[in-house]
Image (cartoon, helix red, strand yellow):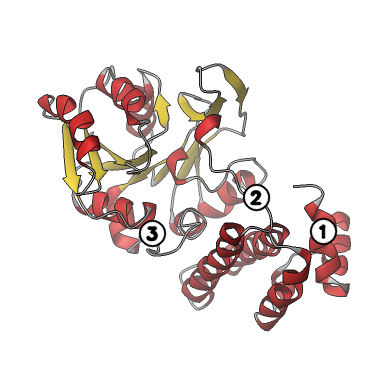
Amino acid sequence: MKFSVIVTVDPNRQTVKKLLDTLKVQTYTNYEVILVVDDQATAMHQLITPYLTDPRFRMVLKTYRGVAAARNFGMENSSGDYILFCDDDDYVDADFLEQLSVAVTDNLGIDMVKYQPQLVDMNGQVLRRVFDTAFSKLSALEAFHILIQGDYVEPAVLYAYRVDFLKEQKLLFQEGKSECDFGFVPLALVYAKAIMSLTYAGFYFTKRNRRQIVAGSEKATRIVYDTLFQYDYMMKKVETDETISDALKKTFFDYISYNVILKGTLLPDDAIPAYTLELNKRSVTKYLNANTISKFITKMKIERDMDAFIKKNKTKK
């Protein structure tokens, strides 16, 4: 069982060394590390070059056009049975790949394996360990129902993906747009035939380097509309796909529709009406489930006044 670890290296950061150090000492040895690096970032080339003496480490050069393009390029250059993604400010425990190897070996045919993150500060101090529900081999419908109850559904770096599954479903990140995880992970979960979730928490997010969004900023507005782009892409792909059950579609549409509505909380108040107009053009509220009292009440509030619902939820974000 070979793992391909795809590392996207942001040319504006110098944080990848800790990740490479932890990947170099993995107790499991059948893996490759593919570093996708900007072809103009000569300082980064010099930082990474010493690691290339290990034949499992490879640097592939590509003009940096965002995380989505870098990950797709990394996948093109991979040769493993399972793919994992790491950002350059992440790092892992020494037994990270070994734990994944045990999981996929004991559960043959698993398309996706989820593991848990730990949030750490710049000194490596654990701030929070995430405890989402663990489960063994489940169908997409069963797994999706469970996973969407957790805190971290969408980060692509929290899953290992079977390569043949990704190829069969032609799953790629949408390039040129931010929020590419939102347009990738929910789709992967829907199309996967078998998913498992581990209690293992050997993957670390460094809080210092997580993107900070300032509500109302130009960057935040771009993120909101890029999320809407990802929403449109997923809806178009899934809505007419007869291989996906109606029950799974219903759960999937409810999840992505509610999330695209809440993304409007990043907008300034005067920009919310234009956004809700776009959402109403897509009839997003018709996809919201009302199968519990609380969800029924939430749907009624959104249908009555989506602008007010988004503004009220801004205080909760």
Q: Label 3 vs label 2: CA separation?
A: 25 Å
Q: Amino acid at mark 3?
A: Phe
Q: Nearer the viewer, mark 1 or mark 2?
A: 2
Q: Label 1 vs label 2: CA separation?
A: 29 Å
Q: Is residue 41 above or below residue 252?
A: above
Dot label at residue 214: 2
Asked if residue 116 shows in the view, the reply is no
Left or right: residue 28 versus residue 99 is: left
The location of residue 169, given as percent across then percent down, is 35, 62
- Residue at label 3? 173
Q: Amino acid at mark 2?
A: Val
The location of residue 314, given as percent across then percent down, is 78, 54
The location of residue 241, given as percent across then percent down, is 47, 74
The quadrant holding residue 125 is top right
Task: Give the secondary structure at mark 2.
Answer: loop
Q: Residue at x 45, y 46 (%)?
A: 156
Left or right: residue 114 versus residue 106 is: right
The quadrant holding residue 303 is bottom right
Q: Residue at x 26, y 21 (%)?
A: 28
Task: Give the secondary structure at mark 3.
Answer: loop
The quadrant holding residue 19 is top left
Asked if residue 160 shows in the view, the reply is yes
For the N terminus, give its image quadrant. Answer: top left
The mark nearer the N terminus, 3 or 2, is 3
Dot label at residue 133: none
- Residue at label 1? 295
The mark nearer the N terminus, 1 or 2, is 2
Mark 1 surroundings: few (<14), some (14-19) or many (≥20) residues within 10 A: few
Q: Is residue 264 above or below residue 92?
A: below
